[in-house]
Image (tube, rainbow, N blue to C red):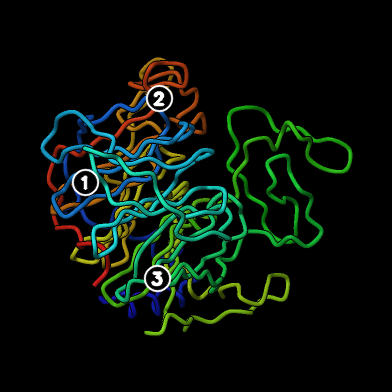
Amino acid sequence: MSFAKRAAFFSVLVGGMALGASMAHASTDSPFDLPATFSTVFLSPLPVEGLATDASGNLYAAGRGGNPCPVYRVPAGGGSAAVVGTLPAPCSPNGLEFDAHGDLYVTNGADKIYRLTPNDQAPPLGSLFASGVPGANGIAFDARGRLWVTDGGTGQGRVWRVAQDGTVVEVFRVQPLASDVNAVAGPNGVATGGVGRDARALPPGSITFAPGGRSAAADAGSLGTVANGVVFDREGALLIADTTRGAVWRVLLREDGSLRSRTDCDAAFPADTLCLEALLVEHPTLEGLDGIALDEAGNIWGVANERNALVVVTAEGAVREIFRNPPDPTTRLRNAGPLEFPTSPVLFGRRLCISQTDVNRRDNAPATAGEVGPTGPVVSKISCLDQPLPFRGVPLPAR
């Protein structure tokens, strides 16, 4: 079933929730029933989130908090990582993606996007490509070389189109779970308590209430991310991971980069907010969905950071859990790995690799267990699935 037909079918079933729930384990003999084990290929002294791969299968990630921030290349066949570029401080890099010419683009969570040509002999300092994209997070090129960027943890769901000259245009917004009507700004800058369902992914702790609403301590570290990882499918639609909702949106675009999907269905949100009919699938297995990648059969591979899990939305619309950390037999915690708050998957051929930031949240709490930890010499890592995927990954950038 094509994505277009599947999207229409999902809309009849209220955004795919009924179908996702009923088909999650519909098959007992499936190419997705593989024994998943992982091998670590890179241990980083700095936090890394985004992950990219070049035409040779090498992996690229950028370390946060350096001065400057290093961009690493991890050889496809194994071996020592090399610094192939840097980003000017202050820097908190998120998504990475190559263009058709071999230049690497890196989003910096403040409001900037940098560009560089990787070089391990003389690592260049990234040059500013675009600014005015607050929270810049997920990143993907369309078939015409335009860059699409999500706003990540700002919670507003904005998606921008960036022209090749760096001009930034907000095209639409993914609908948050709650509007900002009557909302109160939390300590992390994300508004909470507006009209609608205000679901939050909180770090470990207890929820307390102060007079007039939540206390600052209760909201500290909460997330309202509804526009995160992005990738284009073979039909030119933009797929967007919705972290807080546990969902994937499928947004239709015209060849000139303008929006085909409907907006302005709810007056409580800004007029460029998507209607819920663009919600492709929503499912509890996808809670915490961060980065996503597409294979040639149309399956969407993703990592659910809140659940320390690898998941897939199949081309037929089933939601499958490929792997989730097993619970410790004594503590029953799922924080000991091999997944430690996974954030970004990439596919090269039938190989799947995942970056992991080891954030202290939900299934990964406390983050002190496992291979990496917040106070050790290595704080994040990249791991690859030992087993080949049943289908090859779609080559990027989109063609």
Name the residue located 45 percent from the left edge and 52 percent from the top edge. Answer: 107
Pointer 3 local density, CA inside 10 Å: few below 14, some 14–19, many at least 20: few
Q: Is residue 96 left or right of residue 89?
A: left
Foreground mark, 1 or 2?
2
State the quadrant of the C terminus: bottom left
| N-term-proximal mark, 2 vs 3 | 3
Q: Say which residue label 2 marks.
A: 379
Pointer 2 local density, CA inside 10 Å: few below 14, some 14–19, many at least 20: many
Q: Is residue 51 left or right of residue 246?
A: left
Q: CA distance from mark 3 to mark 1?
A: 29 Å
Name the residue located 45 percent from the left edge and 18 percent from the top edge. Answer: 368
- Disc 2, SS: loop
Query: Three-letter amino acid code at disc 2?
Result: Val
Q: CA distance from mark 2 to mark 3?
A: 35 Å
- Quadrant of res 203: top right
Q: Say which residue label 1 marks.
A: 352
Q: Nearer the viewer, residue 168 or 282?
A: 168
The disc placed on residue 164 is 3
Residue 238: horizontal and vertical position, in percent?
39, 70
Residue 286: horizontal and vertical position, in percent?
42, 51
Name the residue located 40 percent from the left edge and 60 percent from the top edge. Answer: 230
State the quadrant of the N terminus: bottom left
